[in-house]
Amino acid sequence: MSSSAGWHIVAVDLKNERISSAWLALLDHYAQDPMGGGKALSAAARDSLIPALVDLPAFHGALAMAGTEAVGLINCFTGFSTFAARPLLNVHDLVCRAGWRGQGVAQALLAWAEARARALGCCKLTLEVLANNHPALAAYARAGFAPYELDPAAGQAVFLQKVLKEV
């Protein structure tokens, strides 16, 4: 996928050292942002992340590249919808470097994820976002995402976590 803004989308190939290095550097950049947790990836995470994901069939990722610089990334993982009896694709990470925001990078990455989900036969795309990340919420709305609810009387779904082991 190309853009007139000087960047293009490539699927993440973690066996390609140039791509995997650019991917890991941008993911670490995202982790250091307040919306990514505000601290760098731990040394253990940096050392083990690529080997853990390289052969994981559930991982699907893409980079927005401007020359040799990664300016955006999307990391997705397949899951399964028991109600639809079909796979789904969860957007786990989406980031665009500040200087590249507003140029369609996030929308192109979300379109890549949608195309990937359709190719996999997924019934839907899912994601979680921090409630005060208003730019991300607006970007997701532009891409067609909406809060998840089965019945308005039951309310919207809430994403919860229980940390089992810190990395």
Image (tube, grey):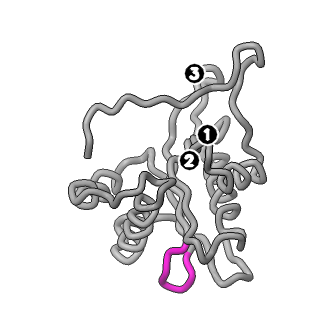
In depth, the one of 60 and 119 nearer the eye is 60
Q: Compare residues 96 and 37 and report the one nearer the observer.
A: 37
Magenta region: which residues? Answer: 65-71
Vertical placement of 61 versus 124: above or below?
below
Residue 117 position within the rendered picture, expressed as x and y whole percent measured from the top left: 62, 47
The circle drawn on residue 126 is 1
The residue singled out by tag 3 in the image is: 82
Q: Position of residue 2 (x, y in %)?
A: 68, 76
Secondary structure at badge 2 equals strand
Q: Quadrant of residue 20?
A: bottom left
Residue sitting at 37 percent across and 28 percent down?
A: 162
Report the mark closest to the observer, 1 or 3.
Answer: 1
- Could you tell which of marks 2 and 1 lies nearer the N-terminus? 2
Dot 1 falls on a residue whose secondary structure is strand
Q: Are marks 2 and 1 in contact (CB under 8 Å)?
A: yes
What is the C-alpha distance between the residues marked 2 and 3? 18 Å
Q: Going 24% across and 55% down the picture, which residue do you hit?
A: 48
Disc with the residue nearer the chain's start (1 vs 3): 3
Q: Is residue 165 left or right of residue 123?
A: left
Indicate the amino acid at tag 3.
Thr
Q: Is the residue 10 above or below the residue 46 in the image?
A: below
Mark 2 = which residue? 91
